[in-house]
Amino acid sequence: MKIWRMLFFSMSLLKLVFAGNPVGFENIIISSTINTLGYEIQIQGDNNLNASVVVKYRPVSAQTFKIGHSPARTDANTFIGSLFELEAENQYEAIFSFSDPDGTSDDSVRVIQFQTTPQPVQKRMNGVDYYVAVDGNDANPGTFEKPFKTIQKAANKVRAGDVVHVRPGIYFQSATIERGGQSGNYVTFRADGKVVLDGSDQRFAVKDNIDNWQLHQSPGIYRTPLEYEPGQVYADGQQLYRADRVSQLNSPKVSSPGSWVYANRTLYIRLSDGSDPDKQYLQVTQLEHALFLHNVNYVILEGFDVQYYGRSVYGKGIYLKNVSKSVIRKNKIHQTYIGLWLKENTSNGNLIEQNEFWETSIYQWPWEAVKGSYHEGAAISLEAGEGNIIRKNQIYGYFNGITIAFWDNYQDASYNRNVDIYNNLLYDIGDDCIEPEGTCTNLRIWNNLMYNCTVGISLAPITKGPVYAWRNVISNFLLTSFKFSYSTTGVCYIYHNTAYTRNPRTSGLVSSGPWNNITFRNNILSGTFYALEDEYLNGNASFDFDNLYTTDKQRFVQWKNKSYTSLTQFSQNSQQELHAMSKISQFLDAGGKDFRLKSNSPEIDKGCLIPNINDNFSGKAPDIGAYEFGLEYLDSLRIEPEHQPRSFELKQNYPNPFKQETTISYALREPANVKLTIYNMLGQEVSIIEEGFRTAKDYKIKWQPGNLPSGYYVLLLKVGSQRMSERCLFIK
């Protein structure tokens, strides 16, 4: 990433005595990424806070300027904002202009030229090729004919331009990388084929080894001595629940597929069927991380399959600390507490793209059992500096998807500045898909697909901002599409999102805490309880030009803890949503998670114009929702083809909720072995309704719970080694 910082001072301002309240620049700081620019304007002289700023921009090759999105005033002396939809490695010109009823100084207009960051490319001006193989030897020179045995040996030798080729195989090892490259001349670690980095203890990955486990207590609690504390334990790839005490193994919070405890240098396990662990393939995480990048820049990690890492509690697949301008791409990172952790405010300009992250078991467990437990991890944890990008990743099965927060201090503005989160696919997430917390100055979240989650985007709390969230699709959520809690006071702009759920008694949007400085425009908020639910009496959120809809005929909106049954009633009494609608959206296929608009959709041409967000609309006015009808580039959210949903699909059962019988539909695009299982919310298996080899076609299966109690159930479809799930509600 290229960060441009320009400080502009007008010394003449110090010599002037202004009449009234004229305003002028003190300095401007700008920071570019591949597709965006963030800026921060420091001003002086506007004592009565009535000045405003207009931003115009253009490529230097263009004749005309476009209007930029209005910057946010974050305090008396500061305006902060972003420019969007920029092209990579292009020259731009921006004009910043003040206006003030009290007059302006001689320093009220600034013209700045800047360049966006290029796509990271290894130009390789020089360098050596090193090779690593499972049958190599670290005494070798690391050549093609005589490879090293460990990645660590190669990491100790590399210099700018070098490429480390890791040959296919399973590597039970970890490596610390402290040698990097230069701009355009990276150090690259590349998997040449199927390379698995495995952090588990191999003593337990053997069936019928009767020497490992001894019966500790009936029924089914076994023990084995262990000199280290593991982070996670898996049985045949399925994560076991970590209990607090050995006594809890007889009555665990989660019964399937089992639970474990580490105490007094001993590992205790109880599998859900009470069987001997020696009869299972167990994965006990032993190594802390697979690849640790430390105090290094310009490194590429590409193509690795990382699994079963974590010692003690905070296991990490890939760990980056004080790392800048590095690229983590096309890796598979799974079954570890945190898939990728980028740490320290000195970590700037990194690109995390086209990776696949997943975890097992957690999405089937009760939310209450996971929240606050050892399992409340995340696929990606961003606790870093400026200009980092997370794009085109696929994430599923984790409790949290992407967290963007400096947990130690929500007021520290040196963390997570000018960050871009876009074109990611997240599903089967136990809690929050995207979770920003803290100052989050110029955090930009767009074009992400999210479904099967508790919360889509959690802004809880944002203490400064601005945060921009636009053109995201959030569907089949259990609590709310956006979460605002712990008194979010930072500036947030929520534009052109489609939030749609048919989970019972679920509002399209819920405020779980007082909110301030929140602006909603051109969104679809569709639920089954309230369309919009606000229980708090204070706050100054602003809503307009949205489509609010609920299937509940007795409710419509709850605002400041008062219920309204119609849009007219709500608008007149609250002065919110004066240009809104409440109509059934016409999507191409909501059941199939295709939320593009049909030609008869009521949202077409009913939105408001937002500069630099929807300038290129089609028709008479912008459309409401994530998609603009008639614009091909917005007909999909541009997820990379290899990261589209998999070659099978489990659809939401119908009807849902249901009383006696429901139909479960799934589709195979290629022949496969299939198992469709029903679990209750304790994680207990209650029924197997489909199992065996199936040809490629659509399937419909009826399920009758019979004497099962009312409540939520999980439908889990396993196709080969992959899984998809849905939740349903049975009401007697």
Image (cartoon, rainbow, N blue to C red):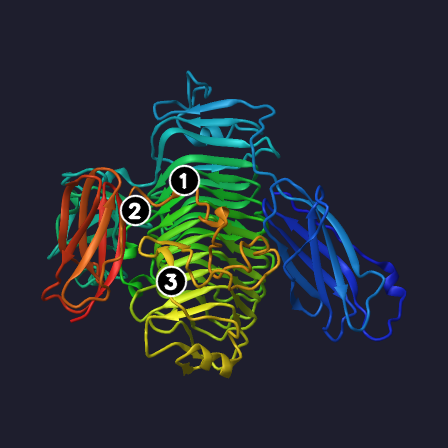
Which residue is depicted at the point 71% across and 63% down?
A: 53
The number of numbered discs placed on residues in the rendered structure image is 3
Instruction: Give the SS element for disc 3.
Output: strand
Numbered tag placed on residue 375 in the rendering: none
Sooner in the amino-acid sequence: mark 1 or mark 2: 2
Q: Look at the picture and state if 60 lies above or below 30.
A: above
Q: Which kind of residue does numbered mark 3 sit on? A: Tyr
Q: Is residue 523 left or right of residue 244?
A: right
Quadrant of the drawing holding the N terminus: top right
Q: Residues within 10 Å of mark 1 (few under 14, many from 20)?
A: few
Q: Which kind of residue does numbered mark 2 sit on? A: Glu
Quadrant in the picture for residue 349:
top right
Q: Look at the picture and state if 672 lies above or below 655.
A: above
Q: CA distance from mark 1 to mark 2?
A: 45 Å
Numbered tag placed on residue 227 in the rendering: 2
Q: Are marks 2 and 3 in contact (CB under 8 Å)?
A: no
Q: Are marks 1 and 2 in contact (CB under 8 Å)?
A: no
Q: Which residue is mark 1?
A: 641
Residue 695 lies, in percent from the top left, at 18, 39
Sooner in the amino-acid sequence: mark 3 or mark 1: 3
Residue 584 lies, in percent from the top left, at 38, 66
Residue 532 lies, in percent from the top left, at 42, 73
Q: Is residue 185 left or right of residue 596?
A: right
